[in-house]
């Protein structure tokens, strides 16, 4: 077997399907402006929604933590990787999110794999929105549970799916609160109702809602549903401008996760620099959630303008705005056109999104000025004229 050839052949297949990916050559991904192909562009492809990754307070607290604890935690938390900042952050995040207990995990990806595979085994059924993040899908696979995908935000389909199984079977319903590709939100009120009717436990992923909705505390907080959503995870890597993930739940569930989450037990805990920044981000949002409000406001303006230009933005109601192009070749033309106008938006194609929904994905940020908003809208106006 020639393994080099095997992989080269696989790459050829990916290229043939127009799905080949490379890591783009850009200067620094979190900054407001990036240079692409020599052109300075407004960065509408980062998840640094609030601009916090460059916030002075986060940087200072990160450096302070390094000076006090060093560059590495050097072990898993349950060995010697614990330090006082960790305990403080877990108390703070639990309070912030309105839960009894919190636990910090290495990344959002690791968190979803670890939580779902700890909670569920092959006796469980997991009901998962078809547009849930890849890490949720991988977590379900790893758990060995039966995986039932319901149509995106389709509560009738969820009910129909739940109904098929015995009441006594253990069930988990899991959903993103803000969907990362469509920018719409989950119908948590209906999901919780169904969970009660069919005796399921509910888990949400607030990766794209944290820092923005519910005074920065997420969509669950905005709806006042902390008591009804059993497991609430999210990340520090997007709106909060840092890195790592959290999960909030009852004392019992967190204790269970400490004992059963393999991504928690068998991985070195996050370094002090990251925990310092995470704490600073929570502290900042606790006292001031105006950035999130501003972002929601900006998003509304841009969405309305795009709609009036005739663009299809699906059911987006958040800072993530898909602009459906629908054709792979046109998609890349559109992306290049916008770059020439000084706007960088991610081009998203299958398998990240369904075929024929190829799209530009705009991630807005709270630090956009009026001039920059006008630049974005003008660029899309010109794009609409040449598509
Ligand atoms: C980004 C993302 C993750 C993964 O988080 P990382 O911290 O980047 O690993 C998990 N869930 C959702 C919904 C995400 O958007």
Image (tube, grey):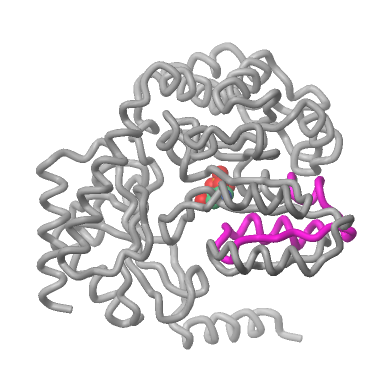
Q: Residue at x 41, y 81 (%)?
A: 356
Taking the image as shown, residue 187 lies to the left or right of residue 202, namely left
Give x and y (percent) for residue 251. 77, 26
Magenta stretch containing residue 179, yes or no? Answer: no
Q: Which residues are magenta?
A: 115-143
Quarter of the image where the C terminus is located: bottom left
Q: Is residue 1 above or below residue 344?
A: below
Image: 325 above or below 339: below
Q: Quadrant of the N terminus?
A: bottom right
Query: Residue at image x 53%, y 52%?
Result: 187
Residue 124 in magenta stretch: yes
As drawn, is 113 to the left or to the right of 256? left
Residue in the image at 72% along x and 27% along y: 74
Question: Which of the two residues, 65 or 301, is positioned nearer the viewer here?
Answer: 301
Q: Examine the image and state in which quarter residue 167 appears.
A: bottom right
Left or right, residue 186 beside residue 50: right
Image-quadrant location for residue 371? top left
Near-viewer residue (204 or 256):
204
How many marks the image carries: the answer is: 0
Q: Position of residue 148 (x, y in %)?
A: 72, 67
* Residue 288, position as x, y percentages in the image: 36, 20
Identify the residue at image location x=81%, y=56%.
143
Q: Position of residue 361 (x, y in %)?
A: 35, 61
In the image shown, does 347 or 156 lie closer to the viewer?
Answer: 156
Q: State the image quarter where residue 159 is shown.
A: bottom right
């Amino acid at each position: 077997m020639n393994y080099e050839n095997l992989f080269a052949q696989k790459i050829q297949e990916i290229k043939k399907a127009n799905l080949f990916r490379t890591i783009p050559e850009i200067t620094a991904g979190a900054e407001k402006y990036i240079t692409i192909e020599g052109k300075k562009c407004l960065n509408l492809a980062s998840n640094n929604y609030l601009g916090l990754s460059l916030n002075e307070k986060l940087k200072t607290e990160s450096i302070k933590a390094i000076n006090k604890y060093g560059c590495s935690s050097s072990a898993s938390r349950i060995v010697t990787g614990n330090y006082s900042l960790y305990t403080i952050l877990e108390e703070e995040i639990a309070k912030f999110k309105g839960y009894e207990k919190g636990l910090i995990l290495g990344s959002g990806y690791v968190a979803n794999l670890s939580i779902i595979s700890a909670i569920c085994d092959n006796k469980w059924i997991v009901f998962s929105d078809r547009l849930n993040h890849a890490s949720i899908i991988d977590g379900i696979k790893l758990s060995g549970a039966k995986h039932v995908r319901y149509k995106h935000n389709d509560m009738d389909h969820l009910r129909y799916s739940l109904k098929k199984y015995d009441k006594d079977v253990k069930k988990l319903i899991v959903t993103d609160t803000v969907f990362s590709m469509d920018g719409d939100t989950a119908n948590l009120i209906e999901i919780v109702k169904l969970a009660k009717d069919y005796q399921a436990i509910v888990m949400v992923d607030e990766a794209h809602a944290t820092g923005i909705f519910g005074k920065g505390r997420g969509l669950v907080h905005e709806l006042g549903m902390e008591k009804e959503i059993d497991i609430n995870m999210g990340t520090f890597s997007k709106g909060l401008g840092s890195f790592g993930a959290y999960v909030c739940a009852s004392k019992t569930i967190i204790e269970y996760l400490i004992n059963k989450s393999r991504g928690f037990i068998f991985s070195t805990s996050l370094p002090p620099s990251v925990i310092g920044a995470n704490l600073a981000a929570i502290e900042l949002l606790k006292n001031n959630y105006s950035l999130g409000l501003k972002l929601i406001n900006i998003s509304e303006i841009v969405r309305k303008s795009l709609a009036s230009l005739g663009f299809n933005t699906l059911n987006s109601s958040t800072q993530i705005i898909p602009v459906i192009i629908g054709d792979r070749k046109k998609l890349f033309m559109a992306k290049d056109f916008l770059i020439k106008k000084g706007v960088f938006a991610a081009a998203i194609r299958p398998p990240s999104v369904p075929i024929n929904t190829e799209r530009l994905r705009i991630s807005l940020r709270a630090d956009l000025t009026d001039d920059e908003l006008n630049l974005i809208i003008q660029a899309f106006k010109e794009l609409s004229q040449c598509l």
